[in-house]
Image: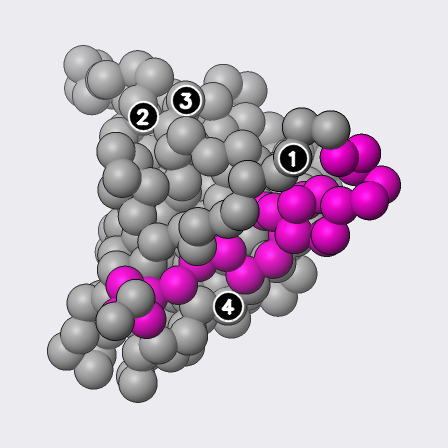
Amino acid sequence: GHRQEVLAVSWSPRHEYVLATGSADGRVKLWDVRRASGCLSTLDQYNGEKSKASSEAANTAHNGRVNGLCYTSDGLHLLTVGTDDRMRLWNSSTGENTLVNYGKVCNESRKGLKFAISCGCNPEFAFVPYGSTVAVYTVFTGELITMLRGHYSTVNCCVFQPHFQELYSGSKDCNILAWIPAPRDPVPDDTSEKCLPQQHVNPAYEDAWSSSDDEG
């Protein structure tokens, strides 16, 4: 098992018997709950390159506490966050670190950090509590798209509602905010892409979310 407290757990949506766990020992482990033996694998941020001679027990996913993890909706990838201010995307089948660079992801939480991944969006987004805001990243490119602002204190958690494509965030300010994608004008069929304003060319790469309170 882990050597320190476990801070995050997540079921695989692809294999109902696979559980991912993150711990203060810096490790992320995958378990088959049907078996009483050891874990299936321990994720290694260096993909085995730093020390090929080291045992799997020495593998670490982060250089700090792993306090958040979440599978993509198809279960093919696992996203983890740690107090080393890093977020990492893993191939859940091979355990490989995909090396997507999200930059510095500020994470000062001593407890579990509950973040969310979109479902049914293209591209897929990761919604990560970031101080009093929620940072929105594209999962597979690592680009920071926008910061959702509306809370007055630290955001503790967020969850994505796939049926209505809504995000809900909870904060120390005792409020729960609902975020919805901003509606857009339809694009004329006979308009070439070169003539379109930027929001039509690539609507994902702008602030397309607003708090439901903004709607009046």
Label 3: element kind: loop
> Is residue 142 found left or right of 25 in the rendered image?
right
Image colouring: one colour
User: How far apart are the two marked residues, 3 and 1, measured between alpha carbons?
Assistant: 33 Å
Does the residue at mark 2 contact the one at mark 4 (Cβ under 8 Å)? no
Residue at disc 2, secondary structure? loop
Picture residue at 67% right of the left edge, 28% below the top: 189
At label 4, which amino acid type do we have?
Met
Q: Report the residue marked by disc 2.
A: 12
Span of residues in magenta: 191-214
Q: Name the residue under label 1.
A: 188
| Residue 57 coordinates in the image, percent (x, y) | 46, 37
Q: Mark 4 points at which residue?
A: 147
Which of marks 4 and 3 precedes in the sequence? 3
Would residue 33 be seen by someone viewing this image from the given angle?
Answer: yes
Which label lies toward us, 4 or 1?
A: 1
Q: Position of residue 35 (x, y in %)?
A: 21, 15
Residue 5's spot in the image, x, y percent? 25, 56
Q: Does the magenta stretch include residue 51?
A: no
Name the residue at 20% across, 82% down.
Answer: 173
| Sequence-wise first label, 3 or 1 | 3
